[in-house]
Image (tube, grey):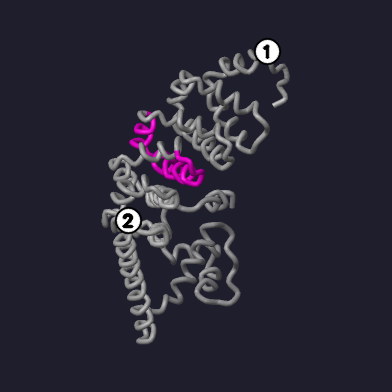
Amino acid sequence: MSDEGSRGSRLPLALPPASQGCSSGGGGGGGGSSAGGSGNSRPPRNLQGLLQMAITAGSEEPDPPPEPMSEERRQWLQEAMSAAFRGQREEVEQMKSCLRVLSQPMPPTAGEAEQAADQQEREGALELLADLCENMDNAADFCQLSGMHLLVGRYLEAGAAGLRWRAAQLIGTCSQNVAAIQEQVLGLGALRKLLRLLDRDACDTVRVKALFAISCLVREQEAGLLQFLRLDGFSVLMRAMQQQVQKLKVKSAFLLQNLLVGHPEHKGTLCSMGMVQQLVALVRTEHSPFHEHVLGALCEELEFCEKLLQTCFSSPADDSMDR
């Protein structure tokens, strides 16, 4: 009995033949007859018996052959597939129509009302494209239609702020998590223009949308991060955190923290730029939700914690350390 119990405590390496399992599971001839279909079959005592019972039960009633598809169901499936492909084609046509609108030259001598109508039409085209390009396939088609060249070449530097921020938003939407599109956008020189918008544009919405696009181009994108470093992107981020626009401060601090977490090799660069002192100065300002991300960025500078402590306690003007 002890030997049988030890064998039954774990699954076998190979399944035994059906006749062997039935004869050994019941302990005699009665067990074999009960396994053959009697209603008084004994329950399995171990995993091997349970597995054998499942195999036997499954073999008694084989799966029925698949039924042929009815004509009604076949027609429904064909219509559903046709509608899906038709919808994709229609969306591509919509994108082509939007690009025709955006490709038109700006009316240089139009009246004020005409210029307002023209701008509204272009803004509507950019908004529709942003909705369509939430779909990654549409975003890829948009780039194949040379839409990204148009955005970077004309609309990031358009005169109307409504066109600039919508162009930056569309670039970010298309670039999110799509390496091929990110590489195309970076190759067009978009990052330099986006950093300039973030740093200098007079419209807060343009700056926020530019930061969104920058984030989509540098997070988890090595080539984008290298460009960001060459263009002194960390200094631009720090200046953005020092502005009075709350959304801009929060998003800039969050991006800085994310880049430090993902790329700790750049902590030394930031320390040499005086970033630690500037972050400490931001923490000392009036309490704000963005302090959470500033403190997160500081915590990532663990290799320079001694320098951080010296900075915190070196100011004789502020003896209180209640923040």
On the image, which quarter does residue 268 sit in?
A: top left
Crowding near the residue tagged with mark 2, few <14, some 14–19, many ≥20 C-alpha atoms within 10 Å: few
Q: Looking at the image, which residue is at 52% across and 20% down?
A: 303
On the image, which quarter does residue 314 sit in?
A: top right
Tell me where residue 5 appears, x and y as whole percent: 57, 52
- What secondary structure characterizes most of the magenta part? helix
Q: Say which of 79 and 256 sits in front.
A: 256
Tell me where residue 232 appears, x and y as whole percent: 40, 28
Q: Looking at the image, which residue is at 28% across and 49% down?
A: 149
On the image, which quarter does residue 66 sit in?
A: bottom left
| Residue type, numbered disc 2 | Thr
Which residue in the rendered view is the most extreme toward the bottom?
71
Left or right relative to 74: residue 201: right
Q: Say which of 315 and 164 sits in front.
A: 164
State which quarter of the image contains the C terminus: top right
Q: CA distance from mark 2 to mark 1?
A: 61 Å
Q: Say which residue label 2 marks.
A: 109
Callout 1: helix, strand or loop? loop
Q: Is residue 205 above or below residue 265?
A: below
| Residue type, numbered disc 1 | Pro
Task: Give the label on residue 179, or none.
Answer: none
The answer, for residue 1, to whether it is visible in the render is: yes
Q: Which residues are magenta?
A: 201-229
Tell me where residue 88 appears, x and y as whole percent: 34, 67
Tell me where residue 260 appears, x and y as whole percent: 48, 30
6 falls in the magenta region:
no
The answer, for residue 68, to whether it is visible in the render is: no
Q: Is residue 26 above or below residue 231?
A: below
User: Mark 2 touching mark 1, by CB under 8 A?
Assistant: no
Q: Say which residue label 1 marks.
A: 316
Q: Say which of 179 and 238 sits in front.
A: 238
